[in-house]
Image (cartoon, rainbow, N blue to C red):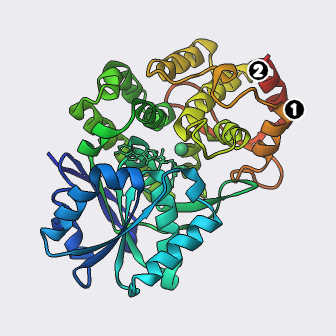
Amino acid sequence: MTTSIAVGLGERSYEVRIGPGLLGQAGRHVAPFLRRPRAAVVTDETVARLHGQTLRAGLEADGISVDEIVLPPGEDQKGFAGLERLCDGLLALGLERRDVVIAFGGGVIGDLTGLAAGLLKRGMDFIQIPTTLLAQVDSSVGGKTAINASAGKNLIGLFHQPRLVLADIGVLDTLPARERRAGWAEVIKYGLIDDPAFVDWCGTRGAAAMAGDPGALQRAVEVSVAAKARIVAADEREEGVRALLNLGHTFGHAFEVSAGYGGGVLLHGEAVGCGMALAYRFSAAQGLCPPDEAARAVNAIAASGLETDPRRLPGGPWDIAALMAAIGQDKKNAGGALTFILTRGIGQAFIARDVDPGAVRAFLASELS
Ligand SMILES: NC(=O)c1ccc[n+]([C@@H]2O[C@H](COP(=O)([O-])OP(=O)(O)OC[C@H]3O[C@@H](n4cnc5c(N)ncnc54)[C@H](O)[C@@H]3O)[C@@H](O)[C@H]2O)c1
Ligand SMILES: [Zn+2]
């Protein structure tokens, strides 16, 4: 059954529709947003091969003609060169400003396509059809679009909300287990932020979801999207509570930068899973969170198979100076002080704006010894 969750942002409000079989019915969902029966679909080679025909048939069934731009898979596309190629490709299709661009893929395709749509002709509409668990529960909702800079991830971007998100649970069948597990880090994140009961649910149903159980996956996507929608509606441009969604991401981004994002050595969700474990242990080390509560949180993350020990995280061994340099570059920092999302327990994340870099360095040294 399809469920719908609203992202309430005034005139930029939109729905996230979640269910099995949405690709095949995509035309019906997409048509109301089109000025003429035509859509440009941006995807990657893997998604095109596995699901491209189903989406095309679903759009054509409603008389929508489809132009497809197929990019190589991988984070490497999320740079200036990839953005330029995509913009040129979309312009070559002769699109008009009122046409709609569809981002059909994981977070890389969504972030890159959303940014291109936001820039082209000073802003075209776009629709997200996310195909990874991570993209369904996180990146397709909320309107953050970006490419990476050599100085760090996602440093060049726009807030540009989609008009609609279609999360077809069925496409997750083909997702490699490692990608599914990485996406689970963002699922459990919502529980760790402010919903302890959802952490318990993840403990009970996480194994089924990881094995591909559609009911468990749908529930996980619904709860995650509802949580993200609520936070985004309260703080679209990350001036306050939205920063909570960065739980685990300050440490996580540092690992990603050090591992060299691209090439698939370390996946975003893997970095975030370990980063959340570090946020809990650092909070405990600072006397903010009871150590047994931190241990329970780390166990909940590890239960899904995510690595919580940075010494064993793919991409190491880690250089503390390089990690600290990446942490210093983090977008969440204001005026030189280190900002982290820390926690007082499961479901009790908060924004800490005054974290001592020396304490972080010492903590990393003990974690990596
Ligand atoms: N905008 C945001 O708010 C936000 C939030 C979180 C993450 N992100 C970004 O998202 C990106 C990571 O996204 P991702 O994890 O989806 O990675 P991804 O887009 O690289 O997809 C992962 C891999 O899975 C393949 N794939 C996609 N769908 C598939 C399917 N159904 N079956 C089989 N294979 C499939 C892709 O081809 C790719 O090789 C990062 O760049 C990160 O910065 C953005
Ligand atoms: Zn993330």
Q: CA distance from mark 2 to mark 1?
A: 15 Å
Q: Quadrant of the N terminus?
A: top left
Q: Residue at x 14, y 75 (%)?
A: 63
> For this rendering, which residue is in front, 360 or 353?
360
Q: Quadrant of the C terminus?
A: top right
Q: Secondary structure at mark 2?
A: helix
Q: Do the residues under discs 2 and 1 have CB atoms within 8 angstroms?
A: no
Identified at 31% across, 25% down, the residue is: 211
Is any atom of residue 173 visible in this view? yes
Q: Quadrant of residue 173?
A: top left
Q: Residue at x 82, y 31 (%)?
A: 320
Q: Position of residue 181 (x, y in %)?
A: 44, 30
Judge from the rendering whether residue 251 lies leftward or rightward of residue 13; answer left or right: right
What amino acid type is highlighted by mark number 2?
A: Leu
Mark 2 within 8 Å of ligand 2, using the beta carbon: no
Residue 296, position in %: x, y?
Answer: 52, 15
Question: What type is the residue that disc 1 sits on?
Answer: Gly
Left or right: residue 157 versus residue 69 is right
Residues 66 and 13: in front is 66
- In-front residue for pair 186/356: 186
Q: Quadrant of residue 57?
A: bottom left
Q: Which mark is residue 45?
A: none
Dot in front, 2 or 1: 2
Ligand 2 appears in which quadrant? top right
Which numbered circle lies on residue 358?
A: 1
Residue 130 in sight: no
Nearer the N terminus, badge 2 or badge 1? Answer: 1
Residue 348, percent from left and from top: 54, 31
Give the residue at mark 2.
Answer: 368
